[in-house]
């Protein structure tokens, strides 16, 4: 049955969807099964499973048995199943299909972000969490438009830049930046500076991959760095507190350990407690519980992982992220089709930035901002988005471009 | 380099991908380094920090030590009591419902995970019933220890719940109104669902619904301790589960109950009743029978006060004491180095007096219960009460002397018969008394009037504001010694050989020929032309003291010179602090500039004037030194400290006998300055009238600088009135008698020492008799019962 589906000369809608064209060839012939995107799939699966174990560690009773998962961990298992299934479907479909709707997705995403901020929207639908208007309450499932916006944004920028080389001029960077401004401003207004801050690095990554001049990028970064201090007055008090908290951490000012740096110092104490090889399950559960680490199943879950599995566990997580990124970038490397290339790079940029910022704040080298650890933190919206990204990378890996595509984004005057 | 790279990777896109990969690896390396730092290099410290959170410490209160007087009477003690407080949810009968599910999930004897939802609900309902019954039974458990009926306690709980509910209703409606106003002001439309949501949020519990409420106070020590133990006990409750019997485990025996330390400091001798025999008072005040008097806070200056506010200085002082004193450290620190006496915010701290200076001994050391939250292991350190401090003071003598110095009795207010006091009759006079046991140098009483009354404003009505009740005049205020110093001068003159045995000095009325208005004898000043040597007699020490002849002592002062006059005072303790730890002290001073005493100043210092001052305690101790056979001892206020040995001053026996003779004659022979007083027209009356008691004494009328108030106005002028004496049972000798008590009395701006302070000294003698220190007749002496 499956073989029949894969190998017959299928002109059905499903076959067309998977092949991305109505060419007459079998689905199997159209797919590049051996491709580096599987590396990302494996890494994503490993990270997701680590996440479920860590959520259980953080939320279950210390005496709970290994198979007696907490309710949140069970929910995450459900989210993972949904995410993986969705990924299989999306990954099999040719990435041209979602790309074809890139403008639509982008517009819908912006619409939803605006909707979140509209005054008068009933709180039953948009209920602020920790002061952030970022979620739409859909009954059993909460939808976070900013998460979906990441995917829509990558698709839109990739679609815009796929045939262009205007970004090789400084003025040509304006339009890609204009793409970035609405989501960044709307998400920052929620306020969710952590997520908003991911879009610019993602854009830079796609621009660099697409061959933008490095000196132009460097100039923009320089201007951005110089202007950064000017943003201090517009920061909200809690945002300033987090930056001050980080400075106090660097000064090792323990007087803040019970207030602004409680979360940071507690996370570091738990990370350090893991030692090289970790602690046994029960001790880890007790330490997490009685140290009262806030957001231990969410933003601070890396601390839980390192407490349980130690330096080795932490390194394994870092390695898994590098593997995911390597998978995505290698997929970009073997793809000649420009849109696929940029999709892989954009997704890799989001995942790597999010992982680095989250782990950095757990380790006390970056201020604590609300940002989840990809694939690991609890939450359906976050997990679904990450698997959607993985699925798109897989889709790029599975669907090689057919002639007459030439190698895209190749220029003779590389200044990088 | 770039070319090499371009040759190796011809595709620009691939080179850019490599760059991006490196950009991802670089921060990962940094993070890995930081991870290694935390997990490997800082592992031990961070693990200890995290482990510390697994231990729950709870402290059990410890009583502060007592302050006792020399006879073991309790002057200050902790009245142990406890407060019982209960969680609001228990009072509101919500606790069982809100905890039933938790206990059901953990129940023994049933596999909760294996139950279907109906069975689970059944188990939860059974758990709720059991917890409800258990909570209801708690009231009976609390009834006996708190001394109140279960119904009474329950009623109290209901009252609290009603009060909190009313409070919650008010808060809820104000929260709702505020939110609706705020949202409408922002232009939001509020549909019914919205309003419901606002109301539901406004209905969130208020702080009072999350905390404990006091249900009983002043639960006594033993019952409180039993409750404390009970409040930590956990029991199992049997319930009928869906699959058979099950047990709810680890249910607190007293759910939501907390027993808190509510100890109070009490001062049992803060109100003392004494009686004064009116027949012993001087003529105009004399009457029949006894005068009952209530004395309040007689030992305020000594015992001191506590406060329940802790300052940073207190914690700093404790840290210093721990650092400096191995003994305190060994008592207070637990094995893990925690100070059991560390200050918490609302702790009681000694503020003044012995309560403050002996804080580190008096302070109790809390008990510590360390419970490992993960394993349930419990380690207990029992609390240790603070140490007792025993004073040399006799609080009843202190109270009697305080009553004597109360202006209402009449001795410390200006009287017509005092003579020459410019203040109106009836004006209250500040005064002080020190009583020192000769043999031991123990300070038996140290009284200063006026003094603060515990819990009251200072006696502002009786004394004017410029007379500060907080100053302990017996040890903290400098007074010119006046003529009472003459005994000390005589002893030193003999020791230094400037006044030979058998030598005499003629009283010429004034010291320097041709200058009859300078260095006059008091008799010449009062009765011009009269001297103590009307017939050319030479005065020795005995006569000099009996008549208090200034010419003799001007001469001795001059002969002693600036070194000799200094040692005369120094050898009886002037210039040495007492270090009693009961607040400010005046150690006495000699000379404005030690090396520049003029001859005139040495002459004046010979009669206790000029640049020299001391306190009543110095005076009493100087006389005790003479009575001790010329052996000096530092006075002691507390009995638990090592007493220094007596230090012989090298005064020969003949001199001591002559001084004793002079003091005896001054106080008991006709013509002695401190023997009798007259009340205008009536006959002279002896100052001392305690039968069976002999007094060796000396008056002093010391010229004092005028007293100015805050505005610079002169408010008091005249002389300070001194009387210093040693009282012993009749039939004993002063020197070597070993059974005497030295008494120093000063009345500020009182005038004549004999007339004003003499009767006070007499009353102190009666007080010593009343308290059993001196016999009621010559043949017996009551010993001190410890």
Image: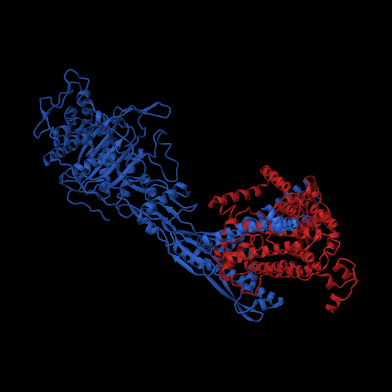
Question: Where the C terminus of chain B falls, by quadrant?
Answer: bottom left
What percent of the width, then of the height, locates residue A297? 65, 63
Q: Please tell me whether residue A166 is drawn above or below residue B606 in the rendered image.
A: below
Report the front residue among B352 and A403.
A403
Query: Is residue B321 among what the camera can see?
Result: yes
Residue B219 left/right relative to B569: right
Nearest the camera: B338 or B421?
B338
Residue located farthest toward the bottom when viewing the structure as drawn? B244
Q: Is residue B420 left or right of residue A61?
A: left
Q: Is residue A300 left or right of residue B510?
A: right
| Residue B691 in view (yes/no) | no
Which colour is chain B painted?
blue
Q: Residue at x 50, y 66 (%)?
A: B371
Residue A48: x, y in percent? 69, 67
Q: Which chain is red?
A: A
Which residue is nearer to you in this view: B2 or B28? B2
Hey, which quadrant is residue B704 in on the image?
Answer: top left
The percent coordinates of residue B109 (x first, y second) are 60, 79
Is residue A207 shown left or right of residue B646?
A: right
- Tell me how many marks there are: 0
Where residue A149 appears, x then y in whole percent? 78, 57
Along the line of sight, which residue is nearer the eye, A39 or B96? A39
């Amino acid at each position: 049955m499956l073989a029949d589906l894969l190998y017959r000369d299928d002109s059905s809608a499903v076959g067309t969807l998977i092949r991305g064209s109505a060419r007459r060839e079998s689905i199997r012939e159209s797919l590049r099964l051996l491709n580096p995107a599987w590396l990302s799939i494996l890494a994503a699966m490993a990270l997701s499973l680590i996440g479920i174990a860590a959520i259980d560690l953080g939320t279950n009773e210390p005496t709970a048995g290994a198979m007696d998962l907490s309710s949140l961990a069970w929910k995450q298992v459900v989210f993972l199943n949904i995410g993986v299934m969705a990924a299989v479907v999306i990954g099999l479909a040719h990435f041209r299909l979602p790309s074809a709707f890139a403008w639509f997705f982008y517009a819908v995403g912006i619409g939803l972000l605006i909707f979140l901020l509209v005054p008068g929207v009933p709180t039953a639908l948009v209920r602020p969490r920790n002061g952030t208007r970022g979620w739409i309450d859909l009954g059993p499932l909460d939808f976070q438009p900013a998460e979906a916006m990441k995917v829509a944004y990558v698709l839109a920028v990739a679609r815009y830049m796929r045939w262009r080389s205007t970004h090789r001029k400084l003025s040509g960077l304006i339009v890609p930046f204009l793409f970035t401004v609405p989501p960044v401003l709307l998400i920052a207004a929620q306020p969710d500076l952590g997520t908003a801050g991911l879009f610019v690095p993602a854009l830079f990554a796609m621009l660099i991959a697409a061959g933008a001049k490095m000196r132009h990028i460097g100039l923009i970064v320089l201007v951005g760095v110089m202007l950064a201090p000017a943003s201090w007055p517009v920061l909200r008090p809690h945002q300033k507190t987090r930056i001050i908290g980080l400075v106090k951490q660097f000064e090792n000012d323990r007087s803040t350990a019970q207030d602004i740096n409680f979360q940071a110092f507690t996370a570091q104490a738990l990370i350090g407690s893991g030692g090289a090889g970790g602690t046994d399950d029960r001790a880890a559960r007790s330490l997490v519980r009685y140290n009262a680490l806030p957001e231990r199943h969410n933003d601070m879950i890396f601390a839980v992982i390192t407490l349980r599995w130690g330096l080795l566990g932490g390194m394994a997580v870092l390695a898994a992220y590098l593997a995911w990124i390597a998978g995505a970038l290698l997929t970009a490397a073997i793809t000649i089709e420009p849109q696929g290339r940029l999709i892989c790079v954009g997704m890799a940029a989001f995942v790597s930035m999010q992982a680095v910022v989250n782990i950095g704040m757990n380790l006390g080298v970056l201020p604590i901002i609300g940002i989840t650890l990809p694939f690991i933190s609890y939450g359906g919206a976050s997990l679904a988005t990450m698997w959607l990204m993985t699925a798109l990378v897989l889709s790029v890996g599975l669907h090689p471009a057919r002639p007459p595509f030439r190698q895209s984004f190749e220029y003779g005057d590389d200044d990088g | 380099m770039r070319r090499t790279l371009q040759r190796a990777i011809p595709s620009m896109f691939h080179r850019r991908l490599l760059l991006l990969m490196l950009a991802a690896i670089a921060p990962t390396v940094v993070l890995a380094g930081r991870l290694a730092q935390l997990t490997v290099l800082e592992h031990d410290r961070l693990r200890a920090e995290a482990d510390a959170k697994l231990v729950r410490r709870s402290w059990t209160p410890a009583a502060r030590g007592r302050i006792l007087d020399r006879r073991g009477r309790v002057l200050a003690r902790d009245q142990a009591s406890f407060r019982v407080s209960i969680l609001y949810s228990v009072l509101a009968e919500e606790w069982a419902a809100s905890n039933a599910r938790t206990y059901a999930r953990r129940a023994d004897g049933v596999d909760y995970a294996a139950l279907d939802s109906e069975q689970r609900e059944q188990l939860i309902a059974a758990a709720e019933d059991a917890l409800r019954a258990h909570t209801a039974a708690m009231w009976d458990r609390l009834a006996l220890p708190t001394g109140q009926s279960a119904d009474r306690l329950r009623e109290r709980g209901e009252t609290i719940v009603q009060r909190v509910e009313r409070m919650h209703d008010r808060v809820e409606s104000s929260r709702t109104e505020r939110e609706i106003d705020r949202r409408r002001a922002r232009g939001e439309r509020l549909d019914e669902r919205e309003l419901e949501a606002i109301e539901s949020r406004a209905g969130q519990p208020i702080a009072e619904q999350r905390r404990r409420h006091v249900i009983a106070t002043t639960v006594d020590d033993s019952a409180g301790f039993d409750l404390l133990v009970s409040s930590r006990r956990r029991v199992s409750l049997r319930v009928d589960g869906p699959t058979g019997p099950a047990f709810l485990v680890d249910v607190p025996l007293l759910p939501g109950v907390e027993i808190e330390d509510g100890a109070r400091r009490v001062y049992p001798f803060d109100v003392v009743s004494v009686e004064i025999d009116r027949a012993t008072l001087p003529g105009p005040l004399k009457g029949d029978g006894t005068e009952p008097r209530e004395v309040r806070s007689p030992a305020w200056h000594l015992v001191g006060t506590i406060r329940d506010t802790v300052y940073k200085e207190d914690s700093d002082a404790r840290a210093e004491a721990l650092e400096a004193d191995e003994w305190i450290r060994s008592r207070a620190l637990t094995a893990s180095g925690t100070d059991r006496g560390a200050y918490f915010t609302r702790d009681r701290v000694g503020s003044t007096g012995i309560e403050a200076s002996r804080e580190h001994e008096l302070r109790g050391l809390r008990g510590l219960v360390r419970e490992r939250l993960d394993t349930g292991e419990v380690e207990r350190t029992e609390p240790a009460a603070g140490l007792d401090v025993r004073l040399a003071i006799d609080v009843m003598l202190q109270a009697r002397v305080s009553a004597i110095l109360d202006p209402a009795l009449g001795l410390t207010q200006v009287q017509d018969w005092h003579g020459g006091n410019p203040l109106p009759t009836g004006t209250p006079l500040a005064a002080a008394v020190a009583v020192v046991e000769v043999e031991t140098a123990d300070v038996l009483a140290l009284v200063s009037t006026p003094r603060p009354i515990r819990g009251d404003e200072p006696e502002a009505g009786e004394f004017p504001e410029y007379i500060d009740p907080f100053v302990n005049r017996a040890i903290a205020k400098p007074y010119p010694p006046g003529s009472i110093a003459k005994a000390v001068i005589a002893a030193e003159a003999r020791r230094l050989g400037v006044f030979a045995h058998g030598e005499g000095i003629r009283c010429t009325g004034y010291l320097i020929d041709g200058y009859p208005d300078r260095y006059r004898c008091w008799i010449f000043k009062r009765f011009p032309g009269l001297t103590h040597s009307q017939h050319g007699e030479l005065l020795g020490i005995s006569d000099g003291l009996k008549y208090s002849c200034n010419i003799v002592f001007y001469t001795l002062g001059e002969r002693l010179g600036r070194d000799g006059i200094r040692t005369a005072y120094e050898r009886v303790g002037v210039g040495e602090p007492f270090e009693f730890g009961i607040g400010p002290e005046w150690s006495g001073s000699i000379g404005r500039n030690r090396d520049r005493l003029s001859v005139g100043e040495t002459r004046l210092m010979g009669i206790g004037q000029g640049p020299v001052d001391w306190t009543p305690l110095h005076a009493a101790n100087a006389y005790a030194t003479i009575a001790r056979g010329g052996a000096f001892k530092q006075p002691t206020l507390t009995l638990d400290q090592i007493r220094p040995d007596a230090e012989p001053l090298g005064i020969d026996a003949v001199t001591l006998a002559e001084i004793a003779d002079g003091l005896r004659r001054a106080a008991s022979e006709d013509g002695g300055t401190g023997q009798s007083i007259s009340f205008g027209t009536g006959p002279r009356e002896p100052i001392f009238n305690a039968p069976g008691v002999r007094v060796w004494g000396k008056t002093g009328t010391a010229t004092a600088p005028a007293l100015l108030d805050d505005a610079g106005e002169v408010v008091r002028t005249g002389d300070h009135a001194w009387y210093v004496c040693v009282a012993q049972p009749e039939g004993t000798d002063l020197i070597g008698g070993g059974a005497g008590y030295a008494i120093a009395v000063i009345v500020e701006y009182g005038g004549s020492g004999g007339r004003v302070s003499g009767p006070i000294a007499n009353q102190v003698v009666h007080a010593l008799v009343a308290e059993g220190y001196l016999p009621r007749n010559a043949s017996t002496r009551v010993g001190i019962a410890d």
